[in-house]
Image: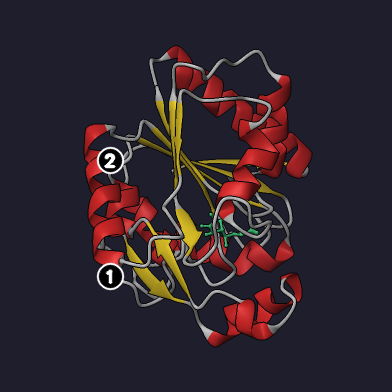
Amino acid sequence: MKIKVVKDEIAGGKEGLRVFEEAKQNGANVFGLATGSTPVTTYNEIVQSNLDFTDSISINLDEYVGLGPDHPQSYRYFMQTHLFNQKPFKQSYVPDGLNKDPQTVSKEYEQLIQEHPIDLQLLGLGRNGHIGFNEPGTALDAKTHQVTLTQSTIDANARFFENENEVPRYAYSMGIGTIMQAKEILIEAYGENKAHAVAQMVEGPVTTDCPASVLQQHPNVTVVLDQAAASQLTKKY
Ligand code: F6R
């Protein structure tokens, strides 16, 4: 793992842009993307850059089941707002949250990734070490699947919805095995509340207790951290 510790997430966004630029110069054309607060500074940098994705393909990690592209909490909506409206791709794929048949969605998404192998996958890190919606305990070789959200995730999301009943109970997510097939991985983490998960991911044993620890077994991973997220690492990087 190449570990880069920077001052803050603004600097992290610039580092993220550099990884995208380098990958593109080396011929990358299929980009795996993530939502959440972590990649926002990288997306901002990409939007302001000269990078052109009009011949490229993007494939997102996950989506809530039941939310369509017009729902402000859907991941498709997030991607449109933060990246695609300003930096269009030739094709941008997000799992179809309106399709309630998990077998079909999972099979078709895996087929899509077979047809367009991911050159560079961007990831954020959950406080509990999750990547995508793959919570601790998920099999490390799983492919795209439907995930049942935990009550704590449902509670945390409730503030974005009119009432708790509207909060999605399920999501579609690439599996850890799917993520590991990407040729290159960029994972970013910012803030002190990620410090424990970062230490487990980088220096802990490879275990389903910390899904991101499996990235130690991938041959080409860059980890971009701010100082707070790096604060529980014991070695100097
Ligand atoms: C997002 C995703 C999640 C987030 C993670 C961190 O598509 O799959 O794994 O990357 O939960 O979220 P933030 O960046 O909001 O701290």
- Badge 2 local density, few (<14 within 10 Å), some, or many (20+)? few
Q: Position of residue 170 (x, y in %)?
A: 45, 73
**Residue placed at 65% from the left, 26% from the top?**
46
**Residue placed at 36% from the left, 30% from the top?**
119
- Spatial CA distance of label 2 from label 1 is 21 Å
Viewport quadrant of the C terminus: top right
Three-letter code for the amino acid on which mark 2 is drawn: Leu
Q: Which mark is residue 112?
A: 2
Position above or below: 55 against 193: above
Q: Do the residues bearing badges 2 and 1 touch, measured as CB atoms within 8 Å?
A: no
Q: Position of residue 181 (x, y in %)?
A: 27, 44
Position above or below: 141 against 40: below
Which sits in the foreground, 98 or 9?
A: 98
Q: Earlier in the sequence, mark 2 or mark 1?
A: 2
**Is residue 67 visible in the rendered structure shown here?**
yes
SS for callout 1: loop
**Residue placed at 34% from the left, 70% from the top?**
207
From the image, state whether disc 2 or disc 1 is nearer to you.
2
Q: Position of residue 129 (x, y in %)?
A: 50, 67
**Is residue 12 visible in the rendered structure shown here?**
no
Q: 35 left or right of 161?
A: left
Three-letter code for the amino acid on which mark 1 is drawn: Ala
- Image quarter of residue 221: top left
Q: Which mark is residue 139?
A: 1
- Image quarter of residue 145: bottom left
**Residue placed at 68% from the left, 27% from the top?**
86
Quarter of the rendered structure image containing ligand 1: bottom right
Q: 184 left or right of 129?
A: left
